[in-house]
Amino acid sequence: MSFMDRFVSGWRKHRQAATDDDFDYAWTMSIDLDRCTGCGACVTACQAENNIPLVGEKELAGGREMQWIRIERYWEGEYPNAKLSFIPMMCQHCDSAPCETVCPVSATYHNQDGLNTQIYNRCIGTRSCAVYCPYEVRFFNYYDHHWPAPLDQQLNPDVTVREKGVMEKCTFCIQRIRQAKDHAKDEGRRVADGEVQPACVQTCPSEALVFGDRKDPNSNVSKSINDPRAYHVLGELNTRPSVVYLKKVDADVV
Amino acid sequence: MANVDRREFLKLVGAGSVGVGAGYLLAESIKHPVEHLIPYSVPPEEFSPGIATWYNSVCGMCPAGCGISVRTREGRAKKIEGNPAHPVNQGRLCALGQAGLQTLYNPDRITAPMLLQGKRGNDAFVETTWKEGLANVSGRLGVPGVATVVLSQGVRGQLANLLELFTAELGSAELLHYDFAHPHTLYAANERLFGQQQLPYYDIANTRYLMSFGADFLNNWLSPVHHSLGFGHSRQGGDAQRLRFVQIEPKMSISGAAADEWVAARPGSEGVLALGIAHQILAGGRYSGSDADDWTAALADYSPELVAEQSGVAAATIVRLADEFAQAKPALAIGGGSAANNSNGTDTLVAVTALNYLVGNIGQAGGLIFNPDPVTGPSASSRRANYEVMRDLAEAAQQGVVDVLIVNNTNPLFTLPTAAGFKEALASIPLIVSLSSFMDETTAMADVILPSHTYLESWGDDVPQPGVGFSVAAVSQPVVAPLYNTRSTGDILLGLASNLGFRDAIPWTTMEECIKDGWREIHARGEPGSGDFDSFWHDVLQSGVWGEDVRQQQDATVSKEVIDNIGVAAPEFAGDVGDYPFVLHPFMSTSMYDGRGANLPWMQELPDPITSVVYGSWLEMNPATADKMGLQDGDLVQVASMQGSVEVPVVIFPAIMPDVVAMPIGQGHESLGRYARNRGANPIQILAPVTDPVSGALATGATRVSVVATGRRAPAVKTGGESRQLGRDIVRFTSTTSDATEHSAKLNSIPISVEPA
C-alpha cells in the first residue's frame, strides 16, 4: 500500500460524516425564504444573547465584522424589474464540516447533538477554520473588545466573553440547549419540540426560522425540512448542513 | 405560538371573565422552566443567584406597543423577548425592540437632575437635587398667568391622562403630543371616509391579495412585528392560497423587497393610481353597492390611460392590477410611507382606503376591521401636534408668548426641518424643561433637566395603536431598579403637581398608584364576582396584558358628499425642476426609526438590510442616473434643497426611480451621546415646509434637491459582499405553478465521494 493509498483511506475514515443515529439530538434549523423579510431582528437578538462584541466603525470598514448571523442580500435584474432577496446566513452546523478537520488543536469539533462546537480556551487562533468555511460564518477576535460601563451589565452570564486571538461563531445558542436538556433530564424525558429556541428563532417576526430536533419526526422542523422547497446552500459541497433553507416562491420562475 | 387570531386569543384569556382569563395567561407566560414571575415589590436580596427572573412589560422603543418579557439575572436585565401572550407581537420582536437594553444601559444617560449654569447649548450643566430641580420648575410654573406648553412624545394610557390633568390644572397651558412618524394623514383619511377616530386593524394574516401603496409595513409602518406575523402566515402559514402582494412606491423599501411585484410610481401619484384602479373596478362592473352610480360619476376622470400618464405606470398594468385586486377574495389595500408623505397625502390615503370599501372587505376577515375605543387613557388622536401646529408653536414662541416649555422625551430639534424655526423658537422661550433620559438636541437647549427613567425602569400602561380588532391593554412595570438618580415621567409630573398644590385633581403620590387607579376601571368592566382588584392586578402584572371581547360596529357607509369629493390633486413640490432635478425621498431606516436608535451601538452596527451600510448616512441613486452624472458608489455628493444642504456618499441602488434619490433618516445628530454624534447627515433638516393641508402633516416627500459631486470619495462602510449571485445559487426560487416534486431536494442523500480516482 502506497503512502497515498494509506493517506486517503485513513482520511476517508475521518471524512465519514456522522449520521443522525450517532447523535442524541440532531438540532436543525429551517429558514423559509418566502417568509423572511430581511428585517434584521435575528441579528440584534443574537448580539444580545451571545455577548457579541461591538467592533466599531474602523474595524467594520476593515472587514472585521462580528455577527454570528447576518442578512445577505442578492439583487436579480435591473430597474424597473429589479428584485431583491434576503437570506439569513449563520454557521450551518455541517455534519461533514470542513472547519473541523482542519483545526490543528481540535478546538472545533462535532458534539453528541450534531452541533459544530467551538472550544474557546483550546483555540490558538490559526484561523484555518475560517479559511475552510465555505459559508464565511466564522469570526476572529483581532482585539480584546470592551463594553463601556454600564453596557457590560447586559452581558449574558450564561455565555463566555471571548478574548483576543479566539475564533467564534454561531452555537445554535448552546447555552439554551444545555439548559433545556438538563431540565428534561431532571424530569426523565427528552426535550420536547419547541422547548428550546435560539434567540434568532425566538424573535423572528415573520416566523421564517424554525428550530428543533430532526430525529423527532413530528417536530415542526422535521415537517419543514420535508417541504418540497427545502434545499441546502452550497449543497454541492457535501458539507451536510443542519440549516435547511426553503426556496423563495417567485411566480415568474418557469 | 402560531398566529393567534382574535378567537384563539379570547380562548386564552377567557371571554368576559377577566380574573380567570388573566390567570390562564399567567400559566401561558411561565412555561419557561426556570422562570419565576414575581412582582418587583419583592426586594432584590430575594433573588436566587443563577436563576433568571422574567418580567412582562411593554416595549417603549416605538409606538406599536408590543408586549415584552424581560429576562433578568441578579437584578440586571439580560435579554428582551416578545411576550407570547400579547396579541400584537405574540412573542416576537423587531431589532429595535431587542436593542432596548442599550437604552437602559447606555453609557450616555443623564444620571441626575441638572441646572444650566451659563449660556444655553454650551453643555454647561451642573448637577442638582430633585428637590431643588422640581422647586426650580414649580416656582416658575406657579406664577399666575405663565404661558406653558407641555410637549410630550406620543403617550397613551394613564400617563396621557395625567398629562391632561396636569395641563388643565396649570391653567394657561397647552398639551401637545409630538411624534415625527405619527400617521396624521392616515387618521384624517379614516376619519373622513368612515368617521372613525381610531386607526383600523389591517388583517394581513388572512388576506390573499395585498396592495400596498408605499406602506413599509414590514419595517416600521404602524405595527411592523404584527404585520410581519400576518405576512408570514398569509405567505406560508397554512393550506390556503399563498398571499400575492404588490408594492407601489418610488423606491424599493424592505417591504417592497418582499413583494411579488414591485411597481415604481411617481412620488405623489399613488392616490391617482388608486383611483384609476377604483375606476377600473367600477367599469368592470365588479362593484354592486347601491352607491355604485355615485362612485362611477366621481371616478369618471380617472381612466387607466389618464392615470398612466400621471403615474408613469402602464395602463395595461393598472387594468391588470385592478382585475387581480377585484377578483382575489379577500383583498386588502393599505397606504402609508411615500404615499402618505406628499401634499396630497390625506386624499391619497382616502383613495387607497376606498379600494377596501369597493371590494367589500370592511369588517371581514382578511380586510379592514375597525378598532374599538381605547379602554384607558384619552382617544388616540387627541392633541396630536402635526407640523402646522409645531410651526405655529415655533412662531408663537418667537413672538415671546410662550414662557415655559416642558419637553417629555421628544426631540423636535432633530425631527423638524430647519425651516420650522424651532431652534430660534427655543431661544425665545425663557424656561425650557426637559424630561429626557438622554442629552438629545432639544435637551441640550434646556435650562432644567429632570431626567426620566427609561421604559424598563418605569411604571406605565398602554393601549396598542392601532389595535388588533378587539380591546387590549397592557401594563409596563420596572424590570430593574433605577440605575441612576432619575424618576419616571409620571412621578416627575406628580412631584411638580405636589409642589403646585394640585392635590384635589391629582391625588396620587406615585405613578404606580395612578396606574392602578386606571386599571380599577378596567377591572370593573369584568363580570361581577370575578375576583377582587388585587388578585386581578397581580394576574395582569404577571401576564403583562389584558384583553376583552369588545368589537367595534363594522357597518361602513361612505356619505355621498365624500364620494362626490373624492379626488387627488397633483402633488406640490418645493423647488424648480431645472435647479433641483431630483425628488428627495427620506425614509425611516430599520434601526434608527426617527433617529432615536442612533445612540444604540447595536443599531449602529446593524447593517441596513438592503445596502448593508453601517454607522452612517448615504444617498440612494438609480444606476443609470449615476452613470449619466459620472458618479460611482462611494463618491461624496452635496444634496441641496432650497432650505440647505448635506454631504453624503452615493450608494448605487437598483430599485429607485431615475429622478428620485433616497436618504435614510436617523443619523446626523449633533448630540445624543458618543454613538450618535457627528455621524452622517439628517435629511429632515433640508426638507421644505410643504404640508398636506387637510391633515397639517409635513409632506416629507415634497422636496426637490440637486445632487452635485464634491470630487471627494468617502465610501459608506458596508458589511455585505457581492450583491449578485453570480451563478452561486445561494438564494433559490421556485414557482407556485410548477410541479412541486420537481424541486424536491432529498437532503443529505448525496453520498460522500472521496474515493481515489
Image (spheres, coloured by chain):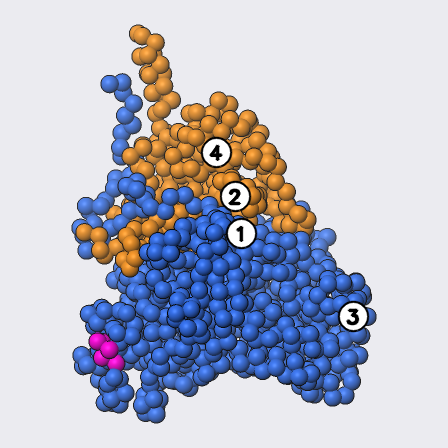
Q: Residue at x 63, y 72 (%)?
A: B423
Which chain is blue in the rendering?
B
Q: Are marks 4 and 2 on the same chain?
A: yes
- Asked if badge 2 and badge 1 are on a common chain, one would say no
**Do the residues bearing badges 3 and 2 touch, measured as CB atoms within 8 Å?**
no
| Chain letter, disc 2 residue | A
- Give the CA distance from mark 2 to mark 1: 9 Å
Q: Look at the picture and state if A64 lies above or below B562.
A: above
Q: Which chain is orange?
A: A
Q: In the rendered structure, does residue A225 fall within the stretch colored magenta?
A: no
Amino acid type shown at disc 1: Tyr
Give the extent of the magenta segment: B302-306
Task: Judge whether A188 appears above or below B395 on screen.
Answer: above
Locate the N terminus of chain B by quadrant: bottom left
Q: Which element is circle 3 on? A: helix
Residue denoted by label 3: B133
Left or right for B145, reference B339: right
Q: Which mark is residue A60?
A: 2
Residue at the spot of label 4 = A117
The number of callouts visible is 4
> Which residue is identified by label 1?
B615
| Quarter of the figure with residue B160 | bottom right
